[in-house]
Amino acid sequence: MTPRRVLAALAILALTAVQAQANPEPWQLNMSPGVTETSRMVYDIHMLILWICVVIGVLVFGAMGYAILKFRKSKGAVPAKWSHNTTAEIIWTVIPVLILVGMAWPATNTLIHMADTDDAELTVKITGYQWLWRYEYVGTDVNFVSKLDRDSDRTRMLGSGLNPADVRTGDQNTYLLNVDNPLVLPTGTKVRFVITANDVIHAWWVPVLGWKQDAIPGFINEAWTRIDTPGTYRGQCAELCGKDHGFMPIVVEAVPREQFDAWLAQKDAEAKAAATAANVPATGDALAVVQ
Amino acid sequence: MATHAAHHDDHDHKPGFVDRWFFGTNHKDIGTLYLLFSLLMFFIGGSMALIIRAELFIPGMQIVNPEFFNQMTTVHALVMIFGAVMPAFVGLGNWMIPLMIGAPDMALPRMNNWSFWILPFAFLMLLSTLFMDGGGPAGGWTLYPPLSLQGGNSMPFVIFAIHMMGISSIMGAINIIATILNLRAPGMDLLKMPVFVWTWLITAFLLIAVMPVLAGAVTMLLTDKFFLTSFFNAAGGGDPVMYQHIFWFFGHPEVYIMILPAFGVVSEIIPTFARKPLFGYQAMVYATASIAFLSFIVWAHHMFTVGMPLGGELFFMYATMLIAIPTGVKVFNWVSTMWKGSMTFETPMLFALGFVVMFTIGGFSGLMLAIVPADFQYHDTYFVVAHFHYVLVTGAVFSIMAAAYYWLPKWTGVMYSETLGKWHFWLSTFFVNLLFFPQHFLGLAGMPRRIPDYNIAFSDFNMWSSIGGFGFGLSQLLFAWIVIKSARGHGPRATAQVWEGAKGLEWTVPSPAPHHTFTTPPVIDDRVLAHGDVTH
């Protein structure tokens, strides 16, 4: 291959890698840069500290490897007598301090960015239950639960005889990563989440959003996101919450703002109609509407 | 019992089997008991890990149901932490501290017997819960409420077992402090003690400080469940997050309780096989003390996702990052000790070198976990599982193996098979990395910890990890075989010195070490102390 073709191939590979990284992939080695500004900041910090650790590791293990090869008795090495070197000790105390400051700076900025939940255009309340999630769009009557899809649920039973590889949505394997009712969110909109739980502690985590947040009974935690690109983003409960902890996934369906507004208006109307019907003295008609 | 013991004060008396192993107060015998108990627990806890890895071998539920899977992760951790790693270090301390400081025994020998004999009963009780109605504890070893309060009848048994382990640890720690501060031979100044003794002294203070905190936390769980209190129940005005703060105030120093003695072991072994004094002895001691101090002010880095205020997150991030400084000093000092030495690579040295490399890898991932925004992604994933197994298995456990090979000839009087020992090291090192390194990738790709089943995307590395797990587990049978062979006296006779470069009082007594040593204090020759380095 010519260098140009190699470059082209690498570029395609890089592009597909970014595309494919929305959800976990076989042989995935690294964190996904995600689909929000926040998740990219987190990814950048992750890569920064990873590379700093790699460089320090190469230096330390390199020195150690050199010592192991060079200063061995079988090669006639004679042990030195010294056991101090104040200059070296000062250097390897001060330099790590500077490196740590270099890491703490971007980490602090990102953290301040993540903590700022002001000016959200939409608030969603998330409640964790054993073992499903409830989503409420604050200010509307839209309110539903989201739990593991039936295909995954059948397959995951002990001795079900079903093959997890057969649980698919489109061309993707969605075993244990699919739900009946996804959380629908608008793209390009700052969405604030208030997160709590009703029984035990859960944690709400969609990796491509760049954070997880514990859902704790008696506490209201806050977080926010602004999703750049439409898509289906999958995650899981991340805090041990009992026997079905591994079986309460999270699916976010990110759609363009107009589509979301239409969806929300329709769901709100349906919910209001259902609520009104429920308040009407029970007649056959009202029951039919509730159905 | 009292009259019984009174009859056996005579040193020349040869006690019978029961008297020696059940009622004995000799530090060497109790050290042996601790070490054998720890080995047994290592295999029991390891079997549980293999059940976990067998279920995770391929996606889908094949072997156990999720309830039992959660019991396995919970009890595996409790057994390994309180039954394998901590008693192993107490055993090493019991055997070696009196020998290293020229004391005839531990300062409080009867209490020593008691602190050991509590443990088998504590673990019998803990393990028996697995056979109870409703099974053993399944809420994770951290016992977070409200989940842990949902458990069945096992709860009070587990809490009582934890109380017993705590009492055992506190008594062991008191004994070690009393021994080191009171029974040093004349001339064994504090800053001339072997580093292993130093690290144990500091560890013992950590134990006394935090085991009562754990006892308090689990007692509050008990009263919440059975006596209608609401310490951690939000519906009754309590606070589930408060439990986590109290637990990790114990839990983080606990991490260093399991690693500081490992630092001590490695600081003994590397100078011996590099034939060069330990680089920066005083820096090592002060670094250990700094780590111990910092361990008290970093606990909330285990709970960055609970929703702390920004200021709290920043404080715990900065404090945690500081730990990298003294830990770095230690690693640099070990490498400098090797620099311009004259190294040989017997099994203890191999395990010590493996420790330095792989513990450092665990330290790197620890530094990454300290960075709060990144931790929001890493937290409660397999990345964390990989991290703490690198520091606990290739860290603490590798140092225990290194110590076992290093002092085995002193304990048994015979040399173990160097060929088998090297096989054990290389098999363990290969498989343990196959076991834990891919777990970094799994965590970064989005696999949460403590799940019994997973998406197809995670299947390849889980399979690698399971193969590594079984390989590592089976390799330890070789270790048991080597130890049993030596204990039965098979092998070439060991000299008193054992290792060419060994320095310290323990190498001045014959191998095997006689039942009673240093009944009269030894005359300290400064050149045999601190690996020949007394110039500081």
Image (spheres, coloured by chain):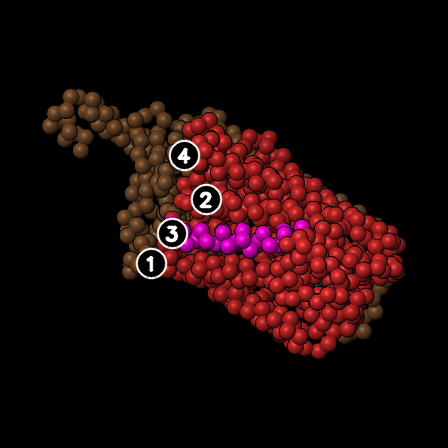
Chain colours: A brown, B red
Query: Which of the two discs, 3 and 1, sits closer to the camera?
Result: 3
Residue A176: horizontal and vertical position, in percent?
A: 35, 50
- Between A166 and A40, the one nearer to me in the picture: A166
Specify the subunit that label 4 lies on: A
Specify the subunit that label 2 lies on: B
Secondary structure predominantly adopted by residues drawn in magenta: helix
Dot 4 crowding, Cα within 10 Å, few <14, some 14–19, many 20+: many
Dots 1 and 2: beta carbons under 8 Å? no
According to the picture, the residue beneath numbered tag 1 turns out to be A165
Name the element at disc 3.
Answer: helix
According to the picture, the residue beneath numbered tag 4 turns out to be A197
* Residues shaded magenta: B111-133
Q: Are the residues flagged by discs 4 and 1 from a single subunit?
A: yes
Residue A279: horizontal and vertical position, in percent?
A: 20, 22
According to the picture, the residue beneath numbered tag 2 turns out to be B155
Dots 3 and 1: beta carbons under 8 Å? no
Name the element at disc 4.
Answer: strand
Residue at the (30%, 40%) spot, across then down: A181
Mark identifier at residue B66: 3
Name the element at disc 1.
Answer: helix
Q: Given the image, on which type of amino acid does mark 4 rest?
A: Ala
Residue at the (65%, 77%) spot, across then down: B490
Q: Given the image, on which type of amino acid does mark 2 rest?
A: Met
Query: Which of the two discs, 4 and 3, sits closer to the camera?
Result: 3
- In the displayed structure, would residue A278 be above or below residue B57? above
Distance CA(mark 4)–CA(mark 3):
21 Å
Is A281 included in the stretch rendered in magenta?
Answer: no
* Quadrant housing residue B273: bottom right
